[in-house]
Image (tube, rainbow, N blue to C red):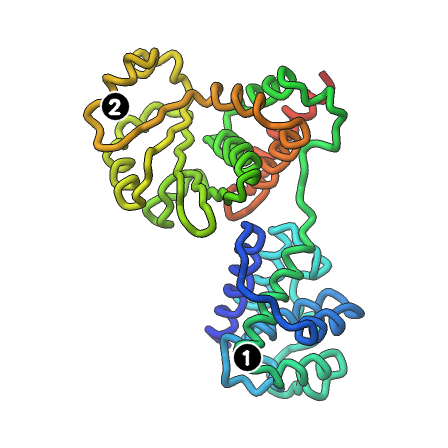
Amino acid sequence: MRNVNVERSVSLLLELVDRIVDGETLGAPAKAATRALFDDHVESHGGSVRLACAFLTAYSVVDQSWDHRAVPTGVRGTYGDKKLATSLTFRHVTFHKNITAFGENLGWKGAVKQFDLSQDARFSPYIRGLAALNAEEKKRLLHHVAWRIATSRVVPQALPPLPGSYLSYARSLSLCESLLAVPSEGHIQQFLVAAFLETHRKRFGNRVQTHHPHASDKFDGMKGDIEEFRDYELVAAYEVTVRSDWKNRLSDFAKKVRDANLPKYVIFAAGVRGDSELSPATKLIDFVQDLPFDLAVVDIHDFFSVFCAELQKEEIGAALNRAYELLSDPRLSGREDILAKYRNVTSAWLES
């Protein structure tokens, strides 16, 4: 049977994990005893019990009428245990030990109402403690559970730790230029810029986020392919493109600047230096003079010339691996064909 509260619980838990991975804070932490309630219980259990406890915590927040004894109807299947386990595996999470369906593994088959969690030794200590919490304590516990899940991620990397000589300015720039040349429908180019920006802005405590290259900014409310935040205030938006049709979207950029009250809009584009409308700067003045906002158009190769000079060697290595991590994220890309291209280029560069 379909239970919308099961679906909402799964979605809520995944959303919290994603927010933590993206660098957000979720408010004040739970008390030590509340955190220990979950941590101590799951420590000695396998992936199915661990993930079931995480799910039940979310369910207790979503369905406040739940009696903390019955297994929620509809927990098994496409919208419940399988979706949660599969989605976490896609996010490179190891907390659940790669199980695929905790409800099935736990024997929650058929009429789940015949099961009583308070009488099941695998759950009863945790369920008793969970039931004793008030709504605010459950919410904070859920944030802790999401954090525990998020911290178990094993982040995919394209490069091993390298001696400093590998990441000299010239060698780093050559790798970036090789990656920029890879046909990837804009995926590699966007995430490489996002990763270098994120690494640099961390120096100032700013947060950078990006989205799927083919997602509509209007659909998800973003003001650009990449956004930069100071605390929760949007301070900059960036467009990354390897196509020339961005010139047809100037009115869209103007609206984004106006709606977000941005001081300027920045576009990192291919071929700017060779575009007679944009280079030299005297031509760019003519191009932007009638616009109602300040537009910066930067050749994407110039971006990496500057940032490979600005970042320290260890920061460059971290940025290159961060770009690969973004490519691996199924919410953003997750395409094995593009990941393979990225690995092939970095492997060839290592051999050189």
Question: Looking at the image, which residue is at 57% across and 73% down?
Answer: 75
Residue 2 visible in image: no
Residue type at mark 2? Val
Q: Which quadrant does the C terminus fall into?
A: top right
Question: Looking at the image, which residue is at 56% across and 40% down?
Answer: 202
Residue 43 x/y as whole percent: 77, 68
CA separation in Å, label 2 and label 1: 59 Å
Residue 149 visible in image: yes
Q: Residues within 10 Å of mark 1 (few under 14, many from 20)?
A: some
Residue type at mark 1? Thr
Left of 303 or right of it: where is 126?
A: right
Earlier sequence position, callout 2 versus callout 1: 1
Query: Where 14 falls versus 173 (above or below)?
Result: below
Left of 54 or right of it: where is 236?
A: left
User: Which residue position holds label 2?
Assistant: 288
Number of numbered markers: 2
Label drawn at residue 88? none
Q: Quadrant of residue 115?
A: bottom right
Residue 139 x/y as whole percent: 55, 72
Question: Looking at the image, which residue is at 62% across and 85% down?
Answer: 132
**In this view of the protein, which residue sits in the foreground, 181 or 208?**
208
Q: Which residue sits furthest right?
A: 44
Label drawn at residue 73? 1
